[in-house]
Image: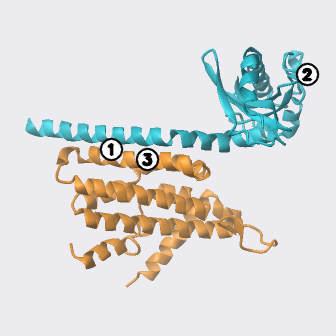
Chain colours: A orange, B cyan
Amino acid sequence: MSETSLVQEFTKGLWKEIPPFRLVLGLCPTLAVTKGIETGVGMGIALTFVLVCSNILIASLRKIIPNKVRIACFIVVIATFVVIVELTMQAFTYPLFLKLGIFIPLIVVNCIVLGRAEAFASKNGIGASIADGLGMGLGYTIALGTLGSIREIFGAGTWFGHAVFGASFQPFTFMVEAPGAFVCLGLMLGLMNLAGKE
Amino acid sequence: MRDVIRMIVVLGVLSAVCGGGLAFVKSGTAAKIEVQQLKFVKGPAIKEILKGATNDPILDRFKLKDGDVERIFFVGVFDGKPSAVAFETYGKGVGGDIGIMEGVDLKTDKLLGIGVTTHKETPGLGSRAKDDPKFRAQFKGLPINEPIKVKPDGGQVDAISGATITSRGVCAGLMAGNSSYKKLKSQILEKARAFAK
């Protein structure tokens, strides 16, 4: 695999196929954990780790895994890495783990991870799969970080927990509630489409 | 037929390897996770009960068995002497077990204070057992040799209005904790002595 196409595999996840905005995949955690930037980025990093590791393992086993049981094999691999992430987060970043709650175990059924395994890693080499996983994961992290920042800044007047406006700021609490997530995501999707219009 | 065998072998081996890997990670992180849970779930209640202790009660802990139940005791050192312990006990509430952290003064055998760690009570009603300091303050100074009951049952504790079952659960949990404490008293004293500074 040549170097330029590796770069291409990596960068496609950052803009052209950025998961929540272009592929519109993995929306459940996107809407649920972006109340603040900390949870958004935490979720993104957890997903990136699972995505890269499962891509590596699935790409290296792609010639051994029989076609008929491939989905079962993918799920076993993905679930293993998700539990590793879950245990590691409990051991080192317990408060973040409490905030993300059920959405960490739910990475197992995240369609981005299974989608990349099925559509990319099972057909490509290890190098390309790492680039693909890193790009998609980073794209997802950026997307969640952006959404989380917007919602936290306007909804709570803080960024990473620090106040950004003066004391007279009245938080626009609608943004940190569930409907705010939909509105914010919709606006982002619209802006992305407008910017990407050819 | 060869296909079937291959599928079984691949899936079986993959599952076995993954399972083994997870067991490895689990045993590697178990001790760290326990500390984190103590710190973030039980820590706030322990710190409040053993306020003014010169040590870190979460680190200075020991385990004792009362029948089948294993209890963790957190030692509070005051003026260089380990003079108080906090431990968790459980009472039946509306939605399940209520975890109660109770602190006992080792010299006077009186309650130093209580705190609720985990519960599944009704938000706004039973949850006040955890959030309302006035309810918790009533328990301070109660001797552990006497029964603890809510006023409707002939006791001394004002129940939270609208949450009598939760209040009863907290009292029952404390009684269970107290009887366990009385049974283990000599062992607790012996173990706590090790933390003198």
For mark 3, what is the residue? A84
For mark 1, what is the residue? A76
Q: Quadrant of the C terminus of chain A?
A: bottom left
x and y, in percent, of residue B193 in the image: 76, 28
Q: How many marks?
A: 3
Q: In front: mark 2 or mark 3?
A: 3
Q: Separation of disc 3 and disc 1 at Cα?
A: 12 Å
Q: Amino acid at mark 2?
A: Gln
Secondary structure category for the residue under label 2: loop
Which subunit holds the residue at mark 2?
B
Secondary structure category for the residue under label 3: helix
Q: Quadrant of residue A123?
A: bottom left
Instruction: State yes or no: discs 3 and 1 in contact (Cβ < 8 Å).
Output: no
Q: Compared to A57, does B59 lie above or below?
A: above
The numbered disc on residue B156 is 2
- Of pointers 3 and 1, the one earlier in the residue sequence: 1
Q: Separation of disc 2 and disc 3 at Cα?
A: 49 Å
Q: Residues within 10 Å of mark 1 (few under 14, many from 20)?
A: some
Q: Amino acid at mark 1?
A: Val
Q: In front: mark 3 or mark 1?
A: 3
Is residue B33 shown left or right of residue A127?
A: right
x and y, in percent, of residue B21 in the image: 36, 42
Q: Quadrant of the N terminus of chain A?
A: bottom left
Which subunit holds the residue at mark 3?
A
x and y, in percent, of residue A49 in the image: 42, 58
Q: Compared to A192, does B96 lie above or below?
A: above
Depth order, front residue of B2/B80 = B80
Q: Separation of disc 1 and disc 2 at Cα?
A: 56 Å
